Image (spheres, helix red, strand yellow):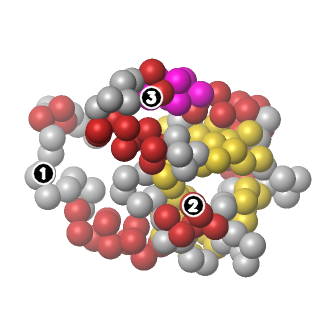
């Protein structure tokens, strides 16, 4: 279970040092084998390989005759790249993925349960300032009665 927000830096080669608090669970869960892909919000999604594989299978079983499904398959599976934690706990983010998410040196890694989101720090801060976490429509009906 990945949770929390970490402000990090990409090095000049596009490598990201995964915070130490996640490394042991990534090594135990997937031996450090990850999949990085594009999200429609212009961030990247980072999955442990065992959590990614059923998502990819379900997505590719959908009919590509539907233009929306085909676009989603192109984005999610088309951008998907394998990554491996190196000996120092870093992963390489390819230039294509860095360009897609407009990642510079300053990034934010956001734990989202079974996956991470990787954001350009400025875009992340703007999103949090703008939406307050609930978007323009307020609370969705699914959260009616939900309490923290």
- In the drawing, what numbered circle is on residue 97? 2
Q: In terms of sequence position, does the residue under pointer 1 or pointer 3 come before the other?
A: 3
Task: Determine whether the residue tagged by mark 1 lies in a helix, strand or loop.
Answer: loop
Q: Position of residue 44 (x, y in %)?
A: 51, 55
The residue sitting at 64% across, 47% down in the picture is: 81
Q: In terms of sequence position, does the residue under pointer 2 or pointer 1 come before the other?
A: 2
- Which residues are the magenta region? 53-59
Q: Residues within 10 Å of mark 1 (few under 14, many from 20)?
A: few
Residue occupying the far front of the picture: 65
Q: Is residue 16 left or right of residue 140?
A: right
The residue sitting at 53% across, 35% down in the picture is: 114
Identify the residue under disc 1.
Answer: 138
Please identify, in this view, whether the residue under mark 2 or under mark 1 is nearer the observer. 2
Q: Position of residue 20 (x, y in %)?
A: 73, 54
Residue 110 shows in this picture: no
Asked whether 86 or 95 is in front, the reply is 95
- In the drawing, what numbered circle is on residue 59? 3
């Amino acid at each position: 279970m990945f949770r929390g927000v970490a402000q990090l830096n990409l090095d000049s080669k596009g490598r990201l040092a995964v915070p130490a608090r996640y490394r042991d669970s990534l090594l135990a869960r997937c031996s450090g084998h990850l999949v990085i892909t594009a999200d429609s919000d212009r961030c990247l999604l980072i999955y442990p390989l065992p959590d990614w594989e059923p998502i990819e299978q379900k997505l590719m079983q959908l009919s590509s005759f539907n233009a929306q499904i085909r676009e989603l398959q192109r984005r999610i599976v088309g951008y998907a790249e394998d990554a491996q934690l190196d000996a120092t706990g870093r992963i390489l983010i390819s230039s294509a993925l860095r360009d897609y998410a407009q990642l510079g040196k300053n990034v934010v890694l956001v734990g989202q349960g079974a996956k991470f989101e990787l954001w350009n720090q400025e875009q992340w801060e703007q999103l949090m300032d703008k939406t307050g976490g609930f978007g323009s429509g307020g609370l969705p009906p699914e959260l009616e009665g939900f309490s923290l």
